[in-house]
Image: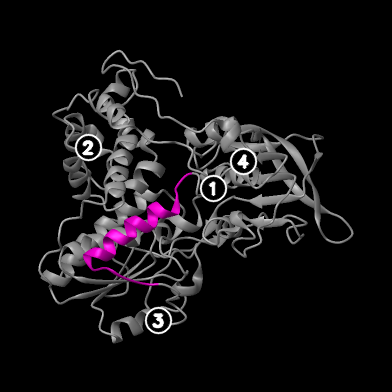
Amino acid sequence: MAATETSRGGTRQPMPEQDPQVRRRNFDEVPLGFTPEAAQAEAERCLQCKKANCVEGCPVGVDIPGFVGRIKTGDFDGAIGKIWEMNSLPAVCGRVCPQEIQCEGRCILARKGGAPVAIGSLERFAADRARKLGTLEQPPPAASTGKRVAVVGSGPAGLTVAGDLIGKGHAVTVFEAFHKPGGVLVYGIPEFRLPKEIVFSEVGLLEKQGVKVECNAVVGRTVSVDELFEDGYDAVFIAVGAGLPTFLGIPGDNLVGVLSANEYLTRTNLMKGYQFPAYDTPTPRGKNVVVLGAGNVAMDAARTAMRLGAERVQVVYRRSREEMPARGEEIHHAEEEGIELNLLTNPTAFLGDDSGRLNGMRCIRMELGESDASGRRRPVPVEGSEFELVCDLAVVAVGSGANPLLTQSTPGLGLNKWGYIVTEEATGKTTKPGVWAGGDIVTGAATVILAMGAGRQAANSIHNYLTLGW
């Protein structure tokens, strides 16, 4: 990636990356990270604004000028310490947060027409250095309050609540349904974008502080929320995500070779399907793969299919490139790796052979009409434009819903018409006393950092409830 010039603040440091023709067939991480010299050079570009707009753009309120200034002077230990004051998952956030619309999007250098400071890359640098050296610990917890909190789900919202509350002196147990902690960070995001060892390392730091993690614990089945209170917990935070697969509801949905992105990525990521047969998790593979949708999950699925040996991978999306919800960086990386964008195209049926296996997809071309409720122009079918695509694997990545396993087994928990938990926006309080919720089970599928921001708000509210009674 070439260096980017800006009129103020010098030249933005390029992030070294694997060559696209090499990485498209491996699961190693794509960006390689800054060297100390590159990190300091990038930190030099920060103007250390008195009014730090970048901090306002961070959902968890990291002191960005503070940690960037420490990197500038070579105080790398001080930099990670400053980040840890507000963010317990910096190596994760430095990789998967949409910095371009949050902290970096508010950078004054960007507002003046230049390239923003690479805040995400600097956060990643500080966190990676601390992890590799293994010499630093997060701040010790406060004195014990004697209160116990159950966190249901170990994704970004749950881990943030756990980190915040253990630091405030409360005993915290995290209940995770899968056999490994991390939630969407491990089952949803591929290794080449977020190596699992990094997630487990961040969880390990929380465990060193005293957070207990219980895996294979399906709250709503093996134990209920009410039973958690009976077991002595004083508060419960629900962060089970939104992992219920969504399909298109078109003919052929049940053909062999049509599967949800949830299953496809879970098999590949959490269950190590990409290392089959070393790991006994068979993952469907195809020569001609189509991925339906255009968000980050769709990009992850398409890039995964290429790495699993596909000859051709197409992303099929009913709107234009301008409406694609995926991060620009993810789209760019996908195209570099040979992923094709088949835009203004809508599937109308999956086609199968006599044995019930997928062998094609019927589609129709679309054009954009007036804007809909989302603010995007509504796709309208073009009459007489039907055609067929050859494909032997279709991954449906058009969103996900609220899994009812916990919510429908918890009396007194208010839900909206889509099955998501209703909460107070500023606190995360639910309609059930002593229960809070946050992340995708409240908002629907969103970003890691927004889930963490919701966790931060809920943790503050839970702390006030446990210590002040409100």
Q: Which label's residue is closer to the chain start, 1 or 4?
A: 4
Q: In this figure, which residue is indicated by the disc labeled 1?
A: 297
Q: Amino acid at mark 4?
A: Arg
Q: Amino acid at mark 3?
A: Ser
Q: x and y percent of residue 374 in the render? A: 50, 42
The answer to which of 223 and 247 lies nearer the viewer is 223
Instruction: Report if residue 101 is visible in the image.
Output: yes
Specify the principal SS of the magenta part.
helix
**Residues under numbered marks 1 and 3 in contact, where contact means CB atoms less than 8 Å apart:** no
Q: x and y percent of residue 20 in the render? A: 57, 32
Q: Residues within 10 Å of mark 3 (few under 14, many from 20)?
A: some
- Gap between marks 1 and 3 measured at Cα: 31 Å
Of the two numbered discs 2 and 3 in the rendering, the one whose residue sits closer to the viewer: 2
Q: Give the residue at x 29% y 58%.
A: 160
Q: Which image quadrant for residue 455?
A: bottom left
Question: Callout 1: helix, strand or loop?
Answer: helix
Of the two numbered discs 1 and 4 in the rendering, the one whose residue sits closer to the viewer: 4
Q: Up-down: is 390 above or below 88?
A: above
Per the rendering, the mark at residue 25 is: 4
Q: Which image quadrant for residue 215?
A: bottom left
Q: Which label's residue is closer to the chain start, 1 or 3?
A: 3
Of the two numbered discs 1 and 3 in the rendering, the one whose residue sits closer to the viewer: 1
Question: Callout 3: helix, strand or loop?
Answer: loop
Q: In this figure, which residue is indicated by the disc labeled 3?
A: 224
The answer to which of 21 and 363 lies nearer the viewer is 21
Q: Which label's residue is closer to the chain start, 2 or 3?
A: 2
Q: In this figure, which residue is indicated by the disc labeled 2?
A: 64
Q: Which residues are magenta?
A: 193-214
